[in-house]
Image (spheres, helix red, strand yellow):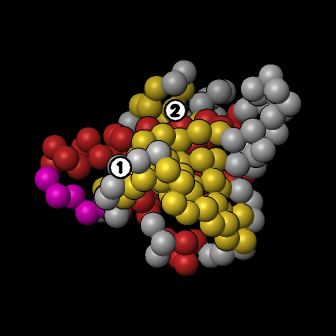
Amino acid sequence: MLAVHGFYENGQVRLNHIPPTKKGVMRVIVTFLEEENDTDSALNTTAYATHIATINSFSILKPNWDSYNADVITPKSIVLATELLADLYQKNRPIEGIFPMRNGGVQIEFSKETQEIELEIFDDTISFLVYENSILLENKSFYNLKITAISKLL
């Protein structure tokens, strides 16, 4: 196991310790998976820290952040997204993108074999959209499902 402490500021992840009281800085704490080799692990740890920082950065978005009356991203959806991201990394799923959603959620896009999958994460709902060759194959929503149950689906 590798623990990385760092911070996210001005769009950059810095992997070292700073006091959490510095204004405008979010603390990033990463606990990473087993190391395969030093180079791959360092790259994966940096990518993971960057993705965590991206998700955490959504917490500073204000109402109307997209100028189309978007809601703020809820703290619960941020927590759920970071938990699901850890599961995706443990399963070596390539992350294609992470985005704030205008209705308060977080979207994570990743690949699984020949499919592209979008997770739309909200306080009490997680939707799975599965595409292959740009064709929607599956669209399921789960309500109040525990992270452990969702993890089995990834």
Q: Residue at x 42, y 53 (%)?
A: 132
Which one is nearer the viewer's eye here, 14 or 86?
86
Quadrant (top left, top right, bottom left, bottom right) of the N terminus: bottom left
Mark in the foreground, 1 or 2: 1
Tag 2 residue? 8
Give the crowd class for mark 1: few <14, some 14-19, many >=20 residues within 10 Å: some
Q: Main secondary structure of the magenta part?
A: loop
Image position, residue 5 (x, y; %):
43, 45
Give the crowd class for mark 2: few <14, some 14-19, many >=20 residues within 10 Å: many
Image position, residue 35 (x, y; %):
21, 58
Horizontal side, residue 114 vs residue 102: left or right: left
Q: Residue at x 67, y 70 (%)?
A: 142
Query: How many numbered markers are drawn?
Result: 2
Q: Residue at x 16, y 43 (%)?
A: 39
| Magenta segment boundaries in residue numbering | 33-37
Indicate the quadrant where residue 16 lies: top left
Q: CA distance from mark 1 to mark 2?
A: 22 Å
Residue 49 visible from this viewpoint = no
Q: Amino acid at mark 2?
A: Tyr
Tag 1 residue? 94
Q: Amino acid at mark 1?
A: Pro
